[in-house]
Amino acid sequence: MGTDTSRTDQDLAVERVWTVPNVISFLRLLLVPVFGALLFAEEDVAALVVLVVAGFSDWLDGVIARLFHQTSMLGQLLDPAADRLYILVTLVGLAWRDFVPWWLVLVIVGRDVVLACLLPPLRRHGYGPLPVHLAGKAGTFALMYAFPLLLLAGVPGTVGTLAWTFGWASALWGVGLYWFAAFLYVEQVVRIVRTARA
């Protein structure tokens, strides 16, 4: 039998599971409880190392997926899931240790609740999760960049002061981008529903 040349890149993307980017994403997910345990145990240096490794792996799997054409539907789900888990665990840990106020946790988690509410209408009209928007990616990157700095804010002296200043600047910028992306997603879903009804 000859090979099936009718299969598209989209078909292959749906089927791919064991790609290098997906393995990296799986490993990043496995590090979430490790990072959480270190953060709550106040092992800040080790927690910081894990967070930096996680952030680097997030960048690396995206680069590999694009360069070697290893994008997959699973990867498109794993990548944002890992990002959100790190953000949630880091936020709760930092708030628990009084590095950030609890309102910041509510503002960021509230955005994900809004996005979760968009899934049922999308599914009713035959759509899966919307593609990750650039603004959302930028917001995630800003937050992931802010958290190590906010963790360093506990260091006394100039280092702590600078970390606090740049950490909060990055965190607020990230929250703004995060919610801007959420409004874009809401607008897309409203447009999809209106078109389907028309």
Image (tube, grey):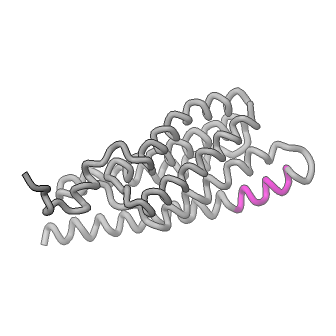
Looking at the picture, tell me which residue is in the foreground, 162 or 30: 30
Q: Looking at the figure, which quarter contains the C terminus? A: bottom left
Residue at image coords 36%, 64%? 186
Q: Residue furthest left?
A: 1
Residue at (68, 54) in percent of width and height: 146
- Above or below, 36 relative to 139: above
Q: Main secondary structure of the magenta part?
A: helix
Residue 13 relative to residue 184: left or right: left
Magenta-span inclusion, residue 70: no
Residue 45, quarter of picture: top right
Q: Residue furthest right?
A: 157
- Across and down, in percent, residue 163 comes to 79, 54
When the figure is inspected, residue 104 is found, relative to residue 136, above or below; the finding is above
127 to the left or right of 104: left
Coordinates of residue 50 in the picture (x, y in percent): 65, 39
- From the viewer's perspective, is 186 left or right of 103? left
Quadrant of residue 42 in the image? top right
Membership of 168 in magenta stretch: yes
Q: Residue at x 17, y 58 (%)?
A: 125
Q: How many marks?
A: 0
- The magenta stretch spans which residues? 160-169
Above or below: residue 167 compared with residue 138: above
